[in-house]
Amino acid sequence: MNTRKGKILLVGFGPGSAEHMTQRAREAIAEADTVIGYATYINLVRDLLDGKEVVRKGMTEEIDRCIEAWERARQGKTVALVSSGDIGVYGMAGPTYETLFAAGWEPGSDIEVEVIPGATALNAAASLIGAPLTHDFCAISLSDLLTPWPRIARRLDAAGRADFVVALYNPKSGRRTQQIVEAQRILLRYRKPDTPVAIVKSAYRQKQDIQLVTLKEMAECKIGMLTTVLIGNSQTYARHGLMITPRGYGNKYDTETGAVREGEQAGRSLRMGLENWKACARAWLREDPIRTPEEAARHFDAPLGEILSAIAESEGDGGAGAWSAARVQGARIDDLLEAAAQWGRLHARVASGTGAECRLTVDNPVFLLDGDRLRLEAPQFSLEIELPRLGQAWFLRRAETESAVHFLDAAGRKVFALSLAGKDKHWQQQAYVHAWQALTKPRAAGFTSLSNAPSEENALNGATQ
Ligand SMILES: C[S@@+](CC[C@H](N)C(=O)[O-])C[C@H]1O[C@@H](n2cnc3c(N)ncnc32)[C@H](O)[C@@H]1O
Protein backbone atom coordinates (compact mmCIF):
# COMPACT_ATOMS: atom_id res chain seq x y z
CA MET A 1 0.00 0.00 0.00
CA ASN A 2 1.23 3.50 -0.90
CA THR A 3 1.92 5.49 2.29
CA ARG A 4 3.28 8.63 0.61
CA LYS A 5 1.03 11.60 1.22
CA GLY A 6 -0.37 13.07 -1.98
CA LYS A 7 -0.16 16.75 -2.77
CA ILE A 8 -1.96 19.09 -5.14
CA LEU A 9 -0.06 22.24 -6.08
CA LEU A 10 -2.27 24.85 -7.70
CA VAL A 11 0.27 26.93 -9.60
CA GLY A 12 -0.31 30.34 -11.14
CA PHE A 13 2.72 30.97 -13.32
CA GLY A 14 2.06 34.62 -14.24
CA PRO A 15 1.37 36.11 -17.66
CA GLY A 16 3.54 33.64 -19.57
CA SER A 17 7.15 34.86 -19.57
CA ALA A 18 9.85 33.07 -17.58
CA GLU A 19 10.97 36.31 -15.85
CA HIS A 20 7.52 36.96 -14.45
CA MET A 21 7.07 33.52 -12.93
CA THR A 22 7.62 33.42 -9.17
CA GLN A 23 10.35 31.37 -7.55
CA ARG A 24 7.76 29.31 -5.70
CA ALA A 25 5.86 28.54 -8.95
CA ARG A 26 9.09 27.26 -10.47
CA GLU A 27 9.88 25.16 -7.37
CA ALA A 28 6.36 23.75 -7.28
CA ILE A 29 6.57 22.56 -10.88
CA ALA A 30 10.01 21.08 -10.14
CA GLU A 31 8.57 19.26 -7.12
CA ALA A 32 5.67 17.70 -9.06
CA ASP A 33 5.58 14.14 -10.45
CA THR A 34 2.69 15.08 -12.73
CA VAL A 35 1.83 18.39 -14.36
CA ILE A 36 -1.74 18.87 -15.58
CA GLY A 37 -3.00 21.82 -17.59
CA TYR A 38 -4.68 23.28 -20.61
CA ALA A 39 -2.46 22.55 -23.62
CA THR A 40 -1.52 26.25 -24.16
CA TYR A 41 -0.44 26.58 -20.51
CA ILE A 42 1.62 23.41 -20.68
CA ASN A 43 3.40 24.88 -23.71
CA LEU A 44 4.25 28.03 -21.77
CA VAL A 45 6.10 26.03 -19.08
CA ARG A 46 7.50 23.29 -21.36
CA ASP A 47 11.12 24.09 -20.36
CA LEU A 48 10.33 22.98 -16.81
CA LEU A 49 8.74 19.63 -17.67
CA ASP A 50 11.67 17.30 -18.27
CA GLY A 51 11.09 13.87 -16.75
CA LYS A 52 7.54 14.63 -15.65
CA GLU A 53 4.32 12.98 -16.57
CA VAL A 54 2.36 15.63 -18.46
CA VAL A 55 -1.43 15.60 -18.85
CA ARG A 56 -2.70 18.05 -21.50
CA LYS A 57 -6.38 18.89 -21.40
CA GLY A 58 -8.64 20.85 -23.72
CA MET A 59 -10.57 24.07 -23.09
CA THR A 60 -13.79 22.52 -21.80
CA GLU A 61 -12.16 19.88 -19.63
CA GLU A 62 -11.70 21.92 -16.45
CA ILE A 63 -13.49 19.51 -14.14
CA ASP A 64 -11.59 16.57 -15.73
CA ARG A 65 -8.36 18.36 -14.79
CA CYS A 66 -9.50 18.59 -11.15
CA ILE A 67 -10.62 14.94 -10.98
CA GLU A 68 -7.39 13.80 -12.59
CA ALA A 69 -5.37 15.80 -10.03
CA TRP A 70 -7.42 14.36 -7.16
CA GLU A 71 -7.08 10.78 -8.36
CA ARG A 72 -3.32 11.02 -8.79
CA ALA A 73 -2.84 12.73 -5.43
CA ARG A 74 -4.77 9.86 -3.83
CA GLN A 75 -2.15 7.54 -5.25
CA GLY A 76 0.45 9.50 -3.27
CA LYS A 77 1.64 11.64 -6.18
CA THR A 78 2.54 15.31 -6.14
CA VAL A 79 0.46 16.92 -8.85
CA ALA A 80 0.91 20.46 -10.17
CA LEU A 81 -2.19 21.91 -11.79
CA VAL A 82 -0.92 24.87 -13.77
CA SER A 83 -2.68 27.98 -14.98
CA SER A 84 -1.58 31.29 -16.43
CA GLY A 85 -1.74 34.42 -14.31
CA ASP A 86 -3.07 33.67 -10.86
CA ILE A 87 -4.74 30.28 -10.58
CA GLY A 88 -7.32 31.73 -8.19
CA VAL A 89 -8.44 34.42 -10.67
CA TYR A 90 -10.91 32.89 -13.14
CA GLY A 91 -8.73 29.81 -12.75
CA MET A 92 -8.67 26.25 -11.51
CA ALA A 93 -8.31 26.87 -7.74
CA GLY A 94 -12.07 27.18 -7.19
CA PRO A 95 -13.17 24.12 -9.21
CA THR A 96 -10.39 22.05 -7.58
CA TYR A 97 -11.54 22.87 -4.05
CA GLU A 98 -15.14 22.19 -5.09
CA THR A 99 -14.15 18.78 -6.48
CA LEU A 100 -12.21 18.00 -3.30
CA PHE A 101 -15.08 19.03 -1.02
CA ALA A 102 -17.50 16.92 -3.09
CA ALA A 103 -15.16 13.94 -2.52
CA GLY A 104 -15.21 14.52 1.26
CA TRP A 105 -11.72 16.08 1.51
CA GLU A 106 -10.94 18.40 4.42
CA PRO A 107 -7.88 20.56 5.12
CA GLY A 108 -5.38 18.56 7.19
CA SER A 109 -6.54 15.23 5.77
CA ASP A 110 -4.62 12.81 3.56
CA ILE A 111 -3.98 15.20 0.66
CA GLU A 112 -2.13 18.47 1.07
CA VAL A 113 -3.20 21.39 -1.10
CA GLU A 114 -1.17 24.55 -1.76
CA VAL A 115 -2.18 27.53 -3.87
CA ILE A 116 0.76 29.36 -5.44
CA PRO A 117 -0.15 32.92 -6.45
CA GLY A 118 0.98 34.57 -9.68
CA ALA A 119 0.66 37.98 -11.34
CA THR A 120 -2.80 38.02 -12.90
CA ALA A 121 -3.53 39.38 -16.38
CA LEU A 122 -4.69 42.74 -15.08
CA ASN A 123 -1.35 43.30 -13.34
CA ALA A 124 0.56 42.26 -16.43
CA ALA A 125 -1.58 44.42 -18.75
CA ALA A 126 -1.40 47.44 -16.42
CA SER A 127 2.38 47.28 -16.16
CA LEU A 128 2.67 47.60 -19.95
CA ILE A 129 0.57 50.74 -20.26
CA GLY A 130 1.65 52.93 -17.33
CA ALA A 131 -0.33 53.04 -14.09
CA PRO A 132 -4.04 52.57 -14.81
CA LEU A 133 -4.85 50.69 -11.58
CA THR A 134 -3.49 53.16 -9.06
CA HIS A 135 -6.96 53.66 -7.62
CA ASP A 136 -9.94 51.39 -6.89
CA PHE A 137 -10.56 48.88 -9.63
CA CYS A 138 -12.51 45.72 -10.28
CA ALA A 139 -12.33 42.75 -12.63
CA ILE A 140 -15.33 41.54 -14.62
CA SER A 141 -15.29 38.55 -16.94
CA LEU A 142 -17.49 38.97 -20.01
CA SER A 143 -17.73 35.20 -20.43
CA ASP A 144 -21.36 34.13 -20.27
CA LEU A 145 -20.45 30.47 -20.69
CA LEU A 146 -21.05 29.89 -16.96
CA THR A 147 -22.52 33.19 -15.75
CA PRO A 148 -25.93 34.55 -16.80
CA TRP A 149 -25.65 37.76 -18.82
CA PRO A 150 -28.03 39.80 -16.58
CA ARG A 151 -25.61 39.24 -13.67
CA ILE A 152 -22.64 40.35 -15.78
CA ALA A 153 -24.61 43.39 -16.99
CA ARG A 154 -25.55 44.27 -13.40
CA ARG A 155 -21.90 44.15 -12.36
CA LEU A 156 -20.85 46.31 -15.31
CA ASP A 157 -23.53 48.81 -14.40
CA ALA A 158 -22.50 48.85 -10.72
CA ALA A 159 -18.82 49.26 -11.62
CA GLY A 160 -19.68 52.10 -13.98
CA ARG A 161 -21.88 53.81 -11.44
CA ALA A 162 -19.26 53.41 -8.68
CA ASP A 163 -16.50 54.83 -10.90
CA PHE A 164 -14.19 51.81 -10.65
CA VAL A 165 -11.42 51.31 -13.18
CA VAL A 166 -12.66 48.13 -14.86
CA ALA A 167 -10.53 45.22 -16.09
CA LEU A 168 -12.43 43.04 -18.53
CA TYR A 169 -11.31 39.41 -18.75
CA ASN A 170 -12.54 37.09 -21.52
CA PRO A 171 -13.77 40.12 -23.49
CA LYS A 172 -14.34 38.40 -26.83
CA SER A 173 -13.99 35.09 -28.65
CA GLY A 174 -14.95 33.69 -32.05
CA ARG A 175 -18.50 33.05 -30.88
CA ARG A 176 -18.87 35.73 -28.21
CA THR A 177 -18.57 38.93 -30.19
CA GLN A 178 -21.40 41.13 -28.84
CA GLN A 179 -20.54 41.06 -25.11
CA ILE A 180 -17.89 43.76 -25.56
CA VAL A 181 -20.41 45.90 -27.48
CA GLU A 182 -22.90 45.56 -24.61
CA ALA A 183 -20.19 46.32 -22.04
CA GLN A 184 -19.35 49.49 -23.94
CA ARG A 185 -23.01 50.51 -24.11
CA ILE A 186 -23.48 50.00 -20.33
CA LEU A 187 -20.30 51.83 -19.31
CA LEU A 188 -21.10 54.77 -21.61
CA ARG A 189 -24.07 55.45 -19.30
CA TYR A 190 -21.53 56.66 -16.75
CA ARG A 191 -18.23 57.33 -18.53
CA LYS A 192 -17.30 59.92 -21.11
CA PRO A 193 -16.77 58.57 -24.64
CA ASP A 194 -13.12 59.74 -24.51
CA THR A 195 -12.34 57.71 -21.36
CA PRO A 196 -8.97 56.00 -21.97
CA VAL A 197 -9.05 52.25 -22.64
CA ALA A 198 -6.04 49.92 -22.92
CA ILE A 199 -6.44 46.77 -24.97
CA VAL A 200 -3.60 44.44 -24.10
CA LYS A 201 -3.19 41.20 -26.02
CA SER A 202 -0.82 38.39 -24.99
CA ALA A 203 0.96 40.40 -22.33
CA TYR A 204 4.56 39.18 -21.90
CA ARG A 205 4.11 36.60 -24.63
CA GLN A 206 5.42 36.46 -28.16
CA LYS A 207 2.48 38.15 -29.87
CA GLN A 208 2.11 40.94 -27.34
CA ASP A 209 0.09 43.86 -28.70
CA ILE A 210 -1.03 47.03 -26.94
CA GLN A 211 -3.62 49.55 -28.14
CA LEU A 212 -4.48 52.73 -26.26
CA VAL A 213 -7.91 53.90 -27.44
CA THR A 214 -11.07 55.47 -26.03
CA LEU A 215 -14.26 53.93 -24.69
CA LYS A 216 -16.10 55.15 -27.79
CA GLU A 217 -13.66 53.21 -30.02
CA MET A 218 -13.25 50.12 -27.81
CA ALA A 219 -15.77 47.74 -29.35
CA GLU A 220 -14.40 48.34 -32.87
CA CYS A 221 -10.85 47.39 -31.92
CA LYS A 222 -9.01 44.12 -32.43
CA ILE A 223 -9.85 42.07 -29.35
CA GLY A 224 -9.47 38.32 -28.89
CA MET A 225 -9.37 35.47 -26.41
CA LEU A 226 -6.00 36.48 -25.04
CA THR A 227 -6.84 40.12 -24.46
CA THR A 228 -7.43 42.03 -21.26
CA VAL A 229 -9.19 45.38 -21.53
CA LEU A 230 -8.59 48.11 -18.95
CA ILE A 231 -11.16 50.92 -18.85
CA GLY A 232 -10.28 54.08 -16.96
CA ASN A 233 -12.37 55.79 -14.28
CA SER A 234 -13.53 59.42 -14.47
CA GLN A 235 -10.05 60.65 -13.44
CA THR A 236 -7.92 58.45 -15.71
CA TYR A 237 -6.01 60.21 -18.48
CA ALA A 238 -3.74 59.25 -21.37
CA ARG A 239 -0.39 60.96 -21.97
CA HIS A 240 2.59 60.03 -24.16
CA GLY A 241 0.98 56.69 -24.95
CA LEU A 242 0.48 55.85 -21.27
CA MET A 243 -2.68 55.50 -19.21
CA ILE A 244 -2.61 56.96 -15.70
CA THR A 245 -5.17 56.88 -12.91
CA PRO A 246 -4.34 59.47 -10.25
CA ARG A 247 -3.85 58.20 -6.71
CA GLY A 248 -5.76 61.21 -5.29
CA TYR A 249 -2.84 63.37 -4.03
CA GLY A 250 -4.41 66.31 -5.85
CA ASN A 251 -7.33 66.20 -3.40
CA LYS A 252 -4.98 67.09 -0.56
CA TYR A 253 -1.93 68.77 -2.06
CA ASP A 254 -1.36 71.47 -4.62
CA THR A 255 0.33 69.35 -7.28
CA GLU A 256 2.56 72.23 -8.43
CA THR A 257 3.80 73.56 -5.08
CA GLY A 258 3.29 70.42 -2.96
CA ALA A 259 1.60 72.57 -0.30
CA VAL A 260 -1.25 71.06 1.69
CA ARG A 261 -4.56 72.48 0.48
CA GLU A 262 -6.57 74.74 2.77
CA GLY A 263 -8.70 72.77 5.24
CA GLU A 264 -6.66 69.57 4.76
CA GLN A 265 -3.96 68.06 6.97
CA ALA A 266 -1.06 65.84 5.93
CA GLY A 267 -1.41 62.31 7.28
CA ARG A 268 -5.06 62.79 8.22
CA SER A 269 -8.31 61.85 6.50
CA LEU A 270 -9.62 64.35 3.99
CA ARG A 271 -12.15 66.95 5.06
CA MET A 272 -14.55 64.82 3.05
CA GLY A 273 -13.31 61.65 4.82
CA LEU A 274 -15.49 59.42 6.95
CA GLU A 275 -15.31 61.48 10.12
CA ASN A 276 -16.01 64.87 8.65
CA TRP A 277 -18.01 64.55 5.46
CA LYS A 278 -21.33 64.81 7.28
CA ALA A 279 -20.24 68.15 8.76
CA CYS A 280 -19.54 69.23 5.14
CA ALA A 281 -23.06 68.10 4.17
CA ARG A 282 -24.57 70.14 7.03
CA ALA A 283 -22.50 73.18 6.07
CA TRP A 284 -23.70 72.83 2.47
CA LEU A 285 -27.33 72.87 3.64
CA ARG A 286 -26.64 75.77 5.99
CA GLU A 287 -25.04 77.88 3.28
CA ASP A 288 -28.28 78.29 1.35
CA PRO A 289 -31.65 77.91 3.08
CA ILE A 290 -33.31 76.98 -0.21
CA ARG A 291 -31.28 73.74 -0.46
CA THR A 292 -33.04 70.51 0.48
CA PRO A 293 -31.72 67.19 1.86
CA GLU A 294 -32.66 65.56 -1.44
CA GLU A 295 -30.51 68.06 -3.32
CA ALA A 296 -27.72 67.35 -0.83
CA ALA A 297 -28.06 63.64 -1.57
CA ARG A 298 -27.54 64.39 -5.26
CA HIS A 299 -24.74 66.88 -4.63
CA PHE A 300 -22.74 64.48 -2.41
CA ASP A 301 -23.81 61.41 -4.41
CA ALA A 302 -24.93 59.77 -1.17
CA PRO A 303 -28.17 58.03 -0.19
CA LEU A 304 -30.80 60.32 1.36
CA GLY A 305 -30.58 58.27 4.60
CA GLU A 306 -26.94 59.36 5.03
CA ILE A 307 -27.88 63.02 4.61
CA LEU A 308 -30.72 62.68 7.14
CA SER A 309 -28.33 61.07 9.60
CA ALA A 310 -25.90 63.96 8.99
CA ILE A 311 -28.69 66.40 9.87
CA ALA A 312 -29.64 64.37 12.96
CA GLU A 313 -26.03 64.26 14.15
CA SER A 314 -25.61 68.07 14.27
CA GLU A 315 -23.47 68.90 17.24
CA GLY A 316 -22.46 72.46 18.00
CA ASP A 317 -21.42 73.20 14.42
CA GLY A 318 -24.40 75.29 13.49
CA GLY A 319 -26.33 72.25 12.33
CA ALA A 320 -27.97 72.01 8.95
CA GLY A 321 -29.59 75.43 8.97
CA ALA A 322 -33.33 75.22 9.43
CA TRP A 323 -33.39 71.45 8.96
CA SER A 324 -33.75 68.92 11.76
CA ALA A 325 -34.19 65.17 11.57
CA ALA A 326 -34.56 62.12 13.77
CA ARG A 327 -34.69 58.46 12.93
CA VAL A 328 -37.64 56.33 13.96
CA GLN A 329 -36.16 53.74 16.27
CA GLY A 330 -36.31 49.98 15.88
CA ALA A 331 -39.21 48.33 14.11
CA ARG A 332 -41.62 51.19 14.71
CA ILE A 333 -42.53 51.90 11.11
CA ASP A 334 -45.99 50.40 11.77
CA ASP A 335 -46.46 52.75 14.71
CA LEU A 336 -45.41 55.66 12.54
CA LEU A 337 -47.92 54.78 9.83
CA GLU A 338 -50.61 54.44 12.46
CA ALA A 339 -49.69 57.84 13.88
CA ALA A 340 -49.68 59.45 10.41
CA ALA A 341 -53.27 58.34 9.93
CA GLN A 342 -54.16 60.87 12.65
CA TRP A 343 -52.49 63.84 10.98
CA GLY A 344 -55.31 64.86 8.68
CA ARG A 345 -54.45 66.01 5.19
CA LEU A 346 -51.04 64.88 3.93
CA HIS A 347 -49.02 65.08 0.75
CA ALA A 348 -47.68 61.69 -0.25
CA ARG A 349 -44.61 61.67 -2.47
CA VAL A 350 -43.68 58.39 -4.07
CA ALA A 351 -40.25 58.00 -5.65
CA SER A 352 -39.86 55.75 -8.66
CA GLY A 353 -36.13 55.48 -8.12
CA THR A 354 -35.56 56.55 -11.72
CA GLY A 355 -36.06 60.27 -11.36
CA ALA A 356 -39.86 60.39 -11.51
CA GLU A 357 -41.87 61.30 -8.46
CA CYS A 358 -45.61 61.01 -7.96
CA ARG A 359 -47.26 63.54 -5.65
CA LEU A 360 -50.78 63.32 -4.32
CA THR A 361 -52.86 64.51 -1.42
CA VAL A 362 -54.60 62.14 0.97
CA ASP A 363 -56.72 62.65 4.05
CA ASN A 364 -55.86 60.56 7.11
CA PRO A 365 -54.16 57.84 5.07
CA VAL A 366 -54.94 54.36 6.38
CA PHE A 367 -52.34 51.80 5.33
CA LEU A 368 -53.63 48.24 5.20
CA LEU A 369 -51.31 45.29 5.56
CA ASP A 370 -51.87 42.70 2.85
CA GLY A 371 -49.30 39.91 3.20
CA ASP A 372 -45.98 41.66 2.87
CA ARG A 373 -47.53 44.59 1.05
CA LEU A 374 -48.69 47.87 2.47
CA ARG A 375 -51.69 49.17 0.64
CA LEU A 376 -53.02 52.71 0.66
CA GLU A 377 -56.40 53.23 -1.00
CA ALA A 378 -57.64 56.71 -1.76
CA PRO A 379 -60.19 58.03 -4.22
CA GLN A 380 -58.79 57.63 -7.73
CA PHE A 381 -55.57 56.32 -6.34
CA SER A 382 -54.04 53.23 -4.86
CA LEU A 383 -50.49 52.73 -3.65
CA GLU A 384 -48.76 49.44 -2.89
CA ILE A 385 -45.45 49.23 -1.09
CA GLU A 386 -43.39 46.09 -0.55
CA LEU A 387 -43.02 46.11 3.22
CA PRO A 388 -39.66 44.27 3.27
CA ARG A 389 -38.26 47.14 1.17
CA LEU A 390 -38.83 49.61 4.00
CA GLY A 391 -35.64 49.62 6.05
CA GLN A 392 -35.79 52.95 7.87
CA ALA A 393 -38.04 55.91 8.57
CA TRP A 394 -37.13 59.47 9.45
CA PHE A 395 -38.85 62.57 10.73
CA LEU A 396 -37.61 65.57 8.76
CA ARG A 397 -38.58 69.13 9.45
CA ARG A 398 -37.65 72.55 8.12
CA ALA A 399 -38.48 75.06 10.80
CA GLU A 400 -41.97 76.37 10.29
CA THR A 401 -42.33 75.39 6.68
CA GLU A 402 -42.18 71.66 6.32
CA SER A 403 -42.92 68.66 8.52
CA ALA A 404 -42.51 65.28 6.92
CA VAL A 405 -41.69 61.63 7.47
CA HIS A 406 -39.50 59.80 4.97
CA PHE A 407 -39.62 56.06 4.41
CA LEU A 408 -36.38 54.69 2.99
CA ASP A 409 -35.05 51.31 1.98
CA ALA A 410 -32.25 49.62 3.92
CA ALA A 411 -29.62 51.39 1.78
CA GLY A 412 -31.17 54.77 2.59
CA ARG A 413 -32.87 55.40 -0.77
CA LYS A 414 -36.26 57.06 -0.71
CA VAL A 415 -39.35 54.91 -1.14
CA PHE A 416 -42.02 57.41 -0.17
CA ALA A 417 -42.63 60.41 2.05
CA LEU A 418 -45.61 61.96 3.79
CA SER A 419 -45.77 65.65 4.72
CA LEU A 420 -48.32 67.75 6.51
CA ALA A 421 -50.61 69.54 4.08
CA GLY A 422 -53.81 70.42 5.88
CA LYS A 423 -55.12 73.85 6.76
CA ASP A 424 -55.36 73.10 10.46
CA LYS A 425 -51.62 73.15 10.89
CA HIS A 426 -51.82 73.93 14.57
CA TRP A 427 -53.55 70.67 15.38
CA GLN A 428 -51.52 68.71 12.82
CA GLN A 429 -48.21 69.93 14.20
CA GLN A 430 -49.23 68.86 17.68
CA ALA A 431 -49.91 65.31 16.53
CA TYR A 432 -46.73 65.24 14.43
CA VAL A 433 -44.51 66.45 17.25
CA HIS A 434 -46.12 64.02 19.63
CA ALA A 435 -45.25 61.14 17.30
CA TRP A 436 -41.69 62.49 16.86
CA GLN A 437 -41.20 62.51 20.60
CA ALA A 438 -42.73 59.09 21.07
CA LEU A 439 -41.01 57.24 18.24
CA THR A 440 -37.47 58.65 18.15
CA LYS A 441 -35.24 57.61 20.97
CA PRO A 442 -32.75 58.03 22.51
CA ARG A 443 -33.15 61.60 21.35
CA ALA A 444 -34.07 63.65 18.38
CA ALA A 445 -31.09 65.71 17.34
CA GLY A 446 -31.06 68.85 15.31
CA PHE A 447 -33.58 70.94 17.15
CA THR A 448 -32.24 73.84 19.11
CA SER A 449 -34.70 73.53 21.98
CA LEU A 450 -33.39 72.32 25.33
CA SER A 451 -34.68 68.81 24.93
CA ASN A 452 -33.17 68.75 21.43
CA ALA A 453 -36.54 67.55 20.21
CA PRO A 454 -39.30 69.84 19.02
CA SER A 455 -41.29 71.00 21.98
CA GLU A 456 -44.98 71.30 21.29
CA GLU A 457 -44.71 74.99 21.96
CA ASN A 458 -42.01 75.41 19.28
CA ALA A 459 -43.99 73.41 16.82
CA LEU A 460 -47.14 75.34 17.51
CA ASN A 461 -45.40 78.71 17.20
CA GLY A 462 -44.03 77.59 13.89
CA ALA A 463 -47.42 76.45 12.76
CA THR A 464 -49.16 79.69 13.51
CA GLN A 465 -46.78 82.01 11.67
C1 LIG B 1 -9.83 32.13 -18.01
S1 LIG B 1 -9.09 33.69 -17.81
C2 LIG B 1 -7.66 33.22 -16.92
C3 LIG B 1 -7.07 34.34 -16.13
C4 LIG B 1 -5.78 33.98 -15.43
N1 LIG B 1 -5.98 32.99 -14.41
C5 LIG B 1 -5.10 35.21 -14.85
O1 LIG B 1 -5.06 35.33 -13.63
O2 LIG B 1 -4.64 36.03 -15.63
C6 LIG B 1 -8.50 34.02 -19.42
C7 LIG B 1 -8.45 35.51 -19.70
O3 LIG B 1 -7.36 36.09 -19.00
C8 LIG B 1 -6.83 37.14 -19.74
N2 LIG B 1 -5.40 36.86 -19.99
C9 LIG B 1 -4.74 35.78 -19.56
N3 LIG B 1 -3.44 35.86 -19.91
C10 LIG B 1 -3.28 37.03 -20.57
C11 LIG B 1 -2.19 37.69 -21.17
N4 LIG B 1 -0.97 37.17 -21.15
N5 LIG B 1 -2.38 38.89 -21.76
C12 LIG B 1 -3.61 39.46 -21.76
N6 LIG B 1 -4.68 38.87 -21.21
C13 LIG B 1 -4.53 37.67 -20.62
C14 LIG B 1 -7.66 37.26 -21.02
O4 LIG B 1 -8.69 38.19 -20.78
C15 LIG B 1 -8.24 35.88 -21.13
O5 LIG B 1 -9.45 35.89 -21.87
Image (tube, rainbow, N blue to C red):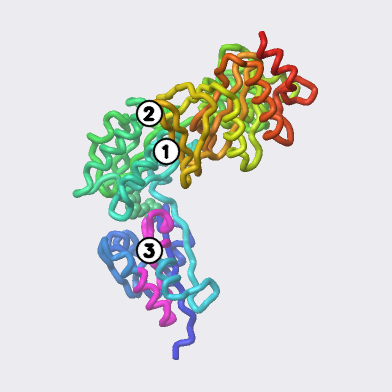
Residue that sits furthest to the front in the current view:
379
**Percent position of residue 455, x then y:** 74, 22
- The Cα atoms of the two marked residues, 2 and 1, are separated by 12 Å
Residue receiving disc 3? 82
Horizontal side of 460 relative to 49 (left or right) equals right
Can you tell which of label 2 and label 1 is closer to the viewer? 1
**In the image, what residue type sits under mark 1?**
Ala
Horizontal side of 141 relative to 272 (left or right) equals left
**In the image, what residue type sits under mark 3?**
Val
Part of the protein shown in magenta: 66-95
Density class for disc 3 (Cα within 10 Å; few <14, some 14-19, many ≥20) is: many
**In the image, what residue type sits under mark 2?**
Arg
Q: Quadrant of residue 54?
A: bottom left
Asked if residue 94 is among those painted magenta in the image, a careful observer would answer yes
Looking at the image, residue 248 lies above or below residue 149: above
| Callout 1: SS | helix
Q: Is mark 1 within 8 Å of ligand 1?
A: no
Horizontal side of 44 relative to 455 (left or right) equals left
Q: Is mark 2 within 8 Å of ligand 1?
A: no
Q: Going 46% across and 75% down the picture, which residue do you hit?
A: 104
Asked if residue 67 is among those painted magenta in the image, a careful observer would answer yes
Query: Is residue 359 shown to the viewer in this render?
Result: yes
Q: Give the mark nearest the N terminus, 3 or 2.
A: 3
Residue receiving disc 2? 191
Residue receiving disc 1? 158
Q: Nearer the viewer, residue 270 or 29?
A: 270
Q: Give the mark nearest the N terminus, 2 or 1.
A: 1
**Percent position of residue 391, x then y:** 55, 40
Can you tell which of label 3 and label 1 is closer to the viewer? 1
- The Cα atoms of the two marked residues, 3 and 2, are separated by 37 Å
